Amino acid sequence: QKEVEQNSGPLSVPEGAIASLNCTYSDRVSQSFFWYRQYSGKSPELIMSIYSNGDKEDGRFTAQLNKASQYVSLLIRDSQPSDSATYLCAADLVAGGTSYGKLTFGQGTILTVHP
Amino acid sequence: EAQVTQNPRYLITVTGKKLTVTCSQNMNHEYMSWYRQDPGLGLRQIYYSMNVEVTDKGDVPEGYKVSRKEKRNFPLILESPSPNQTSLYFCASSFRGTARNYGYTFGSGTRLTVV
């Protein structure tokens, strides 16, 4: 079983809609989670990080973390065609309460926002 | 400008010819890591480093070497490249995991072809 799993999609939403991206992880010691956006042929860009249970909002983006269910999600409100990209979920595996920088990525979800 | 710089951007080489991909960051980040990205397999971590002289294997370290002699540099060495190392490589860096601004910045990528 993969440590971080995402639905590869593609996920298609109309402009202005809410896009919902999901990620599950299998390792209960994972403590820090990240959402990255990657345009075709480009490097990943950090959108948000989340460490605590609950929601974290930044502009049009909301990350949600549920450690009991081992579930992380990203909501994109008012989706724009420029949001069309691959969205990567990543988990930082922690040992002894310390992050060692050993990130594990999901395979990514392709999002298409159509006008 | 705060950035992670990788060189070269593109490289075509022959099997067995040693090569080095350089990575440098100007943000005084403690953590640095290398990833390869392959279609259908996503981003996989090769090596990571918590600080100078502290490195550890990621998920796919075979065939690669790294060193961290200076905080800003983290070169990736392929002693005897093989065609299965043809891939898109990314270097990334971050402040340590306990920092409020923990989150990785990626370089622009190196597309390596081994023939």
Image (tube, rainbow, N blue to C red):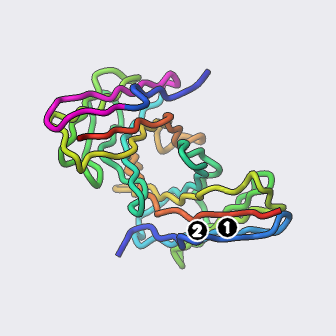
- Choose the circle earlier in sequence order: 2 or 1: 1
Question: Picture quarter containing residue B103?
Answer: top right
Callout 2 touching callout 1 (CB < 8 Å): no
Report the residue marked by disc 1: A54
Chain of the residue under label 1: A
Measure the alpha-carbon separation of dots 2 and 1. 10 Å
Instruction: Specify the amino acid type for callout 1.
Output: Gly
- Comparing A37 with A111, the one in front is A111
Report the chain holding disc 2.
Answer: A
Q: Name above or below for residue B71 compared with residue A38.
A: above
Relative horizontal placement of residue B88, taking residue B105 as reference (left or right):
left
User: Is residue A62 in sight in this rendering?
Assistant: yes
Please tell me whether mark 2 sits on a helix, a strand or a loop: strand
Q: Which residue is located at x 13 percent, y 35 percent?
A: B16
Closer to the observer: label 2 or label 1?
2
* Looking at the image, residue B64 lies above or below residue A23: above
Measuring from the top left, give residue A72's x and y in whole percent: 58, 68
Could you say which is closer to the camera, residue A101 or residue A107? A107
Magenta span has B67? no
Residue A98 visible within the image: no
Q: State the residue at coordinates (27%, 35%).
A: B54
The amino acid at mark 2 is: Val
Picture coordinates of residue A26, whole percent (x, y): 41, 73
Q: Are marks 2 and 1 on the same chain?
A: yes
**Image point (59%, 58%), residue name:** A87
Disc 2 marks which residue? A72
- Farthest residue in the bottom direction? A69
Instruction: Please state the extent of the stretch shown in magenta in the rendering.
Output: B11-28
Other-residue count near label 1 (Cα within 10 Å), few / some / many at <14 / 14–19 / ≥20: few
Residue B65: horizontal and vertical position, in percent? 21, 36
What's the residue at 34%, 55% (across, down)?
A96
Q: Quadrant of residue B114?
A: top left
